[in-house]
Image (cartoon, rainbow, N blue to C red):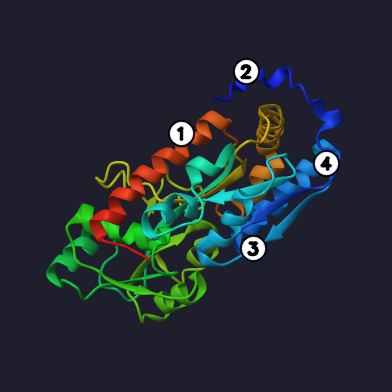
Amino acid sequence: MLLFTTLATPAFGQNKYPDRPVKIIVGFPPGGPTDIVARLIANRLEKALGQSFIVENKPGGGSNIGSQEAARAKPDGYTLFLGTVANATNISTYKKLNYDTQRDFIPISQLVSSPSILVANNDQPFKTLPELIAYAKANPGKLAYATSGPGGSPHLAGEMLKLRAGIDLLHVPYKGAAPAMNDVIGGQVGIGFKTASGVTTTLQAGKLRPIAVAGRERMPQLPDVPTLIELGFPDFEVSSWSGLMAPTGTPPDIINLLAKTTIEIMKSPDIRKQLEGIGAFPVGSTPEEFKKYIDDEIKKWAVVAKAANIEL
């Protein structure tokens, strides 16, 4: 087990690691929120540790292609992985994976958390969550929710709402978050769970109606929008998170050096400002804290996937 208290005395030391460029594999395309976070941390690690940290995008399969490659990489600290919520949900939604998040990776530090927001088309006949639930109960199976595709966190969030609220919603999957959001704006679909990092600007422009935030706390950008927890749904937390991981077998001293450096980076006021600008919040957890968080996420989504019979 990694002991964070050993950070003060790493055997490798910053003079020995890294002594050549480090690769960070990202399982999603360039330009999206996950990629933005990866490049932000890569830039800061490069400045802090004096070597290049290069982001390598390996999109496909809901991040499974990149995850598999990272899991099989040599565990020497020169290949890292930007794990995301997909690494917690895919375990329960895919029939077969060629990697295991808990077995094949060592958590280093959670970087960010971006809560999902339940949004509605402006023309829908409800403005609050109780009104939405009442409408759905009066019109079973008629209210549709849009997602970026089957098995992702927006899909699981919709299924969790169905289970917790006892309502029947119609799932409408799209090939990506952008077309899903566009059809909610256009009124083709009534509602959807959208990650804050991808929808905050749209909400502030009044193009969608925010119903509730699926986070622990209200968002500073949307102070008048309540959380689902406030509205009577305990532990209803849906977050698009990401964090640094390394292949299992990576030396503990390297893990601890990277964790210590990352935690300091995430405390930076300018990092917080940049992240909050895209609806994300810095975390900077220890390896032990990040491991517990991942384990809890896997357990939570396994229950929802089983109840909703989601299988990809």
Pointer 2: what residue?
A: 5
Quarter of the image for residue 118 reads bottom left
Query: How much space separates mark 3 and mark 1, taking CA atoms?
Result: 26 Å
Sequence-first tag of 1 and 2: 2
Pointer 1: what residue?
A: 292
The x and y percentages for residue 142 are: 21, 76
Give the label on residue 47, or none: 4
Label 1 secondary element: helix
The residue type indicated by label 1 comes to Lys
Front residue of 62/134: it is: 62
Sequence-first tag of 4 and 2: 2
Sequence-first tag of 3 and 2: 2
Pointer 3: what residue?
A: 58
The x and y percentages for residue 9 are: 73, 17
Picture residue at 70% right of the left edge, 51% below the top: 24
Q: Is residue 218 left or right of residue 171?
A: right
Looking at the rendered image, the disc whose residue lies closer to the viewer, 4 or 2, is 2
